Image (cartoon, rainbow, N blue to C red):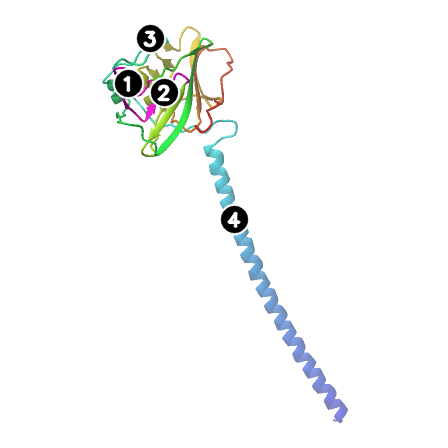
């Protein structure tokens, strides 16, 4: 074999070896790429599952077009018999038993660790019923001698929630302090009868459960409306709280 043939053979061998090495590198590159892409797909799928779960959870807890209303069961104690008369309703002359029936205690002073406000409107046959000052208070000689975590300072309908702990309180507790019966289809002596009915609204949304179970929330607007069961009433959906409240 001539020198030229030997050089050509060695060159072909080197080329074949380089081609084999390149093919090997190409295979390794494709393998690594598949691993990277597969990992990315799995991550995307996992992220997609999380998003779907969170979205479904949110949709379930706050359906579109309705209010987010928290409730917990409440029934007044048997120490007293709340009023089942027509409005207006005054604060009980002896508030102590009604406060106890609401499951609350009289404090020597307001506790402000947790402090927020809700608002209550009571509308009967199209007219506002006053929510009086002094609900949730013990008075002695015309002066405040004690107060609960739920109380009113005036007749604006603003409910003051002032507590040492972040405990849920219900509308039923507040109305029990007021000395008025509140249940499904009943407010005082007003009941679902004679073509009239009690309708409950929270932030402008109709609430179909027991109004006594509604948990009070910051800047919540609650409307108890009694009137024609076939009417489509206009009820407030918000309340303009004073600056800082």
Q: What count of labels does the image hold?
A: 4
Q: Where is residue 64 in the image (x, y as percent from the top left)?
A: 52, 30
Q: Where is residue 68 in the image (x, y as percent from the top left)?
A: 45, 29
Distance (Cα) linking label 3 and label 4: 58 Å
Q: Quadrant of residue 144?
A: top left
Q: Residue furthest left?
A: 79
Vertical relation: 24 (above or below) 34: below
Q: State whether residue 210 appears in this view.
A: no
Mark 3 or mark 1, which is nearer the start of the sequence?
A: 3
Q: Are marks 3 and 2 in contact (CB under 8 Å)?
A: no
Q: Which residue is drawn at 58% across and 58% down?
A: 37
Mark 2 or mark 4, which is nearer the start of the sequence?
A: 4
Q: Where is residue 71 in the image (x, y as percent from the top left)?
A: 38, 27
Q: Which residue is drawn at 55% across and 61% down?
A: 35
Vertical relation: 224 (above or below) 17: above
Question: Which circle marks residue 153 in the picture?
Answer: 2
Question: Residue 96 magenta-drawn?
Answer: no
Q: Where is residue 94 in the image (x, y as percent from the top left)?
A: 25, 15
- For label 4, the residue is 47
Q: Which residue is drawn at 72% across and 90% down?
A: 6
Instruction: Give whichever of 37, 146 is nearer the camera.
Output: 146
Q: Do the residues labelled 1 and 3 touch (CB within 8 Å)?
A: no
* Image: magenta residue range: 134-156
Distance (Cα) linking label 4 and label 2: 51 Å
- For label 1, the residue is 143
Q: Quadrant of residue 171?
A: top left
Q: Do the residues labelled 2 and 1 touch (CB within 8 Å)?
A: no
Point out the frontmost of discs 1 and 3: 1
Distance (Cα) linking label 2 and label 1: 12 Å
Q: Are marks 1 and 4 in contact (CB under 8 Å)?
A: no
């Amino acid at each position: 074999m001539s020198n030229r043939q030997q050089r050509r053979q060695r060159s072909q061998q080197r080329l074949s070896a380089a081609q084999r090495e390149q093919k090997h590198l190409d295979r390794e590159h494709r393998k690594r790429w598949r691993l990277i892409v597969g990992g990315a797909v799995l991550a995307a799928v996992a992220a997609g599952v999380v998003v779907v779960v969170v979205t479904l959870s949110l949709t379930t807890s706050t359906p579109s077009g309705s209010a987010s209303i928290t409730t917990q069961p409440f029934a007044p104690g048997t120490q007293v018999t709340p009023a089942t008369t027509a409005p207006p309703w005054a604060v009980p002359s002896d508030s102590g038993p009604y406060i106890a029936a609401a499951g609350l205690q009289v404090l020597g002073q307001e506790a402000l660790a947790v402090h927020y406000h809700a608002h209550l409107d009571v509308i009967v046959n199209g007219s506002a019923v006053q929510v009086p000052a002094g609900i949730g208070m013990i008075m002695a000689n015309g002066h405040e001698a004690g107060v609960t975590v739920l109380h009113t300072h005036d007749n604006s309908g603003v409910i003051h929630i002032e507590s040492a702990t972040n405990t849920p309180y219900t509308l039923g507790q507040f109305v029990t302090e007021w000395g008025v019966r509140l249940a499904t289809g009943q407010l005082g002596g007003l009941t679902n009868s004679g073509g009239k009915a009690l309708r409950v609204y929270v932030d402008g949304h109709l609430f179909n459960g027991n109004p006594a179970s509604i948990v009070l929330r910051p800047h919540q607007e609650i409307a108890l409306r009694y009137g024609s069961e076939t009417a489509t009433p206009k009820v407030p959906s918000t309340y303009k709280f004073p600056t800082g409240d």
